[in-house]
Amino acid sequence: MGGLNQQTGDEQVAAQISADDRAETYGAALGILFDATCVIDPSLTVLDCDDGFLKLLELSEEQVVGQPIPDLNLTGSVDGEPITLRHVARLGSWRGHTTLARKEHPELSMDTLLIKSSGELPRLHLFFRDLRGPLSVQVGEVDHQHALAQVGRLSALAEMTSGIAHEMNQPLAAIVNYANGCVSLVKQGRAEDEVLIRALTAIADQSQRAAEIIRRMRAFARRSDGQREPFHLTELLKDALSLSEPHRRRVGIEVQCEFLATNDEIVADGIQIEQVMLHLIRNASDSLAALPGDRPRIIRVSTRELVGTGIESSMIETTVTDSGAPMPQEQEVRLFAPFETTRENGLGLGLVISRSIVEAHGGRLNYLGTSESPPGGPSFCFTLPLKAAPI
């Protein structure tokens, strides 16, 4: 029976993830996370801004672009001096509270992210979130964290598009082949009941496989409602491993699991915890993909229970270790900085989002350095409170 050209289909899908697509992903992410943005040059002149920035200032584009940025006061200090935009330009990035002056209007209180671009022409990108509004700061932070997590999931799915296409192509190709075989047998008058039943059963099985792939993707992509329910962490880890399987199989990665925790029940937003695990696996897979062909490619996932004492909660710890090369020190120190990425099409938000998710659940996410035990590469771990423990 004839087959489908899987490689050609995958290459076509991968080709669609162009620089323009990645730019749109950045724009969508920042549109969710921030209310306004502008770009300034070293002389602090506004080069560009969005409508949100104009609305905050209550000015027209002609009054803003090409003019010095309004007084922006940053909270904090550097080397004993109040921090300024020029300090940020030297540091590379900064996140904190600012106040923005406005002509004939009260100043604004803002949550602000500043990032220096790495191109030939130095620029400073400013992203603002307005702290005014009827909701309390606490509720605003929760909504912000959920939006941030959603951005991370959509970004992860965008990165996995080619692998998902390949995974879907296999059951679809099998369905087409079995269906064409049935048609051929009927035309030739050799359509025995037993043969047709086997072929139709195979079509049903492959259809269920394709439906399961779509179900997993839709469940992962949907926006979380923030509800926390009892889950067995081991099942969430297995779901994340299933989502990452297409990429791991193409790279030739072996997964070793050692689930030692006898009690693994947590109360959590299952989608978000799965997202944390998927990001750690994806990071490890990308590192292993760069290894020479003769090097073993191994990811080890383990869990263990950390029994609390006194007022401390009992926790479950998950560790993800790979057999990749040690992480450069300069990369280590900026691991959890926003928009830091080694992926060509990455957002640089994965670890930032993952850490915020884990901490919102009462746990910790840490980089452990290079593991001394097999497989002997970079190692991350995160902890979560067990259900029996108060959250």
Image (cartoon, grey):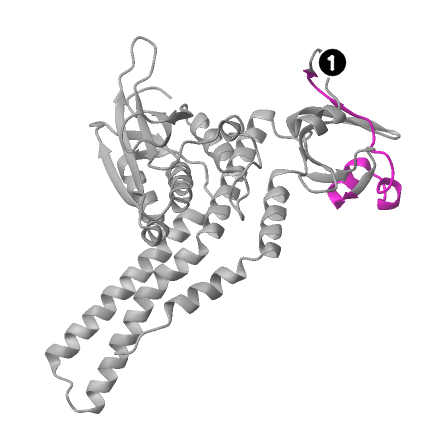
Q: Is residue 232 visible?
A: no
Looking at the picture, does residue 368 appear above or below residue 163?
above
Looking at the picture, does residue 346 appear above or below residue 208?
above
Is residue 2 on the magenta stretch?
no
Looking at the picture, does residue 123 appear above or below residue 311?
below
At a point 30% along the width and 65% down the height, the residue shown is: 171
Q: Nearer the viewer, residue 99 or 49?
A: 49
Label 1 environment density (alpha carbons within 10 Å; few <14, some 14–19, many ≥20): few
Find residue 44 and report its horizontal and vertical position in percent: 81, 33
Identify the image quadrant of residue 87: top right
Q: Nearer the viewer, residue 256 or 289?
A: 289
At a point 88% along the width and 41% down the height, the residue shown is: 63
Q: Is residue 221 visible?
A: yes
Residue furthest out toward the bottom: 188
Quadrant location, the N terminus: bottom left
Find residue 40 and report its horizontal and vertical position in percent: 78, 37
Find residue 278 and report its horizontal and vertical position in percent: 39, 41
Find residue 55 and report its horizontal and vertical position in percent: 78, 40
Q: Nearer the viewer, residue 182 or 390?
A: 182
As helix, strand or loop, the secondary structure at mark 1 comes to strand
Residue pointed to by mark 1: 81
Identify the image quadrant of residue 105: top right
At a point 37% along the width and 72% down the height, the residue shown is: 5
Q: Is residue 318 left or right of residue 27?
A: left
Q: How many marks?
A: 1
Q: Is residue 153 left or right of residue 254?
A: right
Q: Amino acid at mark 1?
A: Glu
* Residues in magenta, as a range: 48-77
Is residue 52 on the magenta stretch?
yes
Quadrant location, the C terminus: top left
